[in-house]
Image (cartoon, rainbow, N blue to C red):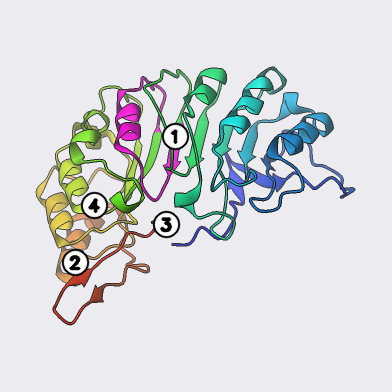
Amino acid sequence: MTLGDYPHVFHGLPVYTFPEPDRNTDLPEPDAVAWRVGTTVYDAGEEWEEVFARFLDKVDTTRVRALVVGAWHEAYDTDSSAVIEALLAARDRLPALRALFLGDMESEECEISWINQTDVTPLLTGFPALEEFGVRGGSGLEFPAVSHARLRVLTMESGGLPAEVVRGVGASDLPALEHLDLWLGTPDYGGDSEPADLEPILSGARLPSLRHLALRDSEIQDAVAAAVASAPVVARLETLDLSLGILTDDGAAALLAGQPLTHLKKLDLHHHYITEPLLDRLRQTLEPAGVELDLDRDHADEDVESDGTVWRYVSVGE
């Protein structure tokens, strides 16, 4: 999977990139779009904070509902602290903000594992009315346990999500959270979590509203699937997403041997290494119950060495 395209929609709104200073462009209505504010990673003519200052000057930000933070200068070497400070300093000018994404960079700008982050929870405490929050990049990312009464969607995209971050999410008090999406990644890029780190999430005790769970892009996807198979939270899910990782017959068999999944609206396993007999069993078990299955192998290609060693890869690493 290549992060090669900026999102076209965020929080149900079309994404509009705030223009460069020399462009004389009619701007859309402040509440009609999700505003993307960014500079360039290399040879930036403006720092991100300068672009944001122009945005605050040109747009009636009291009406802005969604904000996408794009690249900041030297994101491969500089974390998001200054960006976060600028956002928090302007919070009184953003009373309608309900959705925020931090680190929207495509691969050609900065590989996902190169994006430097920091403790992002001040954005949640600083914007208590947020309903959706997303962050890309696991390097330096911190997420100590936090309480937030209104957050409904939390997304963390990474080639390797630190175990401390996973545990922080599990220890957080998020009573309104409906959708949780964690890209667990690989140890090569800092993804050192184990199934035990997921237990507070899988118990569902702190997530009473959760209906959509994605635990994906994992090098230990089979072990994740085995943990999910007996997890209490699954009984109230509408969608379960274990895609993008190294899911094999072992993980598929664990799902089939675990609690019934026939109540799900959708099970997403795309980018997998499951053989056809297990795929048939999944179809025969779940499709008659009306479960939508995504079993596209995608680009999950194996490398086999002359000695028989098989190499399999997650979809998003570097």
217 on left or right of 309:
right
Residue 115 falls inside the magenta stretch: no
At x 34%, y 57%, the residue is: 244
Among numbered discs 2 and 3, the one appearing first in the sequence: 2
The segment highlighted magenta reads: 153-178
Read off the residue under disc 4: 221
At x 20%, y 59%, the residue is: 282
Read off the residue under disc 1: 154
Kind of element beneath mark 2: helix
Kind of element beneath mark 3: loop
Read off the residue under disc 2: 280
Q: What is the C-alpha distance between the residues marked 4 and 2?
A: 20 Å
Badge 3 density bin: few <14, some 14–19, many ≥20, Cα 10 Å: some
Badge 2 density bin: few <14, some 14–19, many ≥20, Cα 10 Å: few
Q: What is the C-alpha distance between the residues marked 1 and 4?
A: 20 Å
Amino acid at dot 3: Glu
Read off the residue under disc 3: 318
Mark toward the viewer: 1 or 3 = 3
At x 34%, y 27%, the residue is: 168
At x 19%, y 69%, the residue is: 275
251 on left or right of 218:
left
Amino acid at dot 2: Asp
The mark tally for this picture is: 4
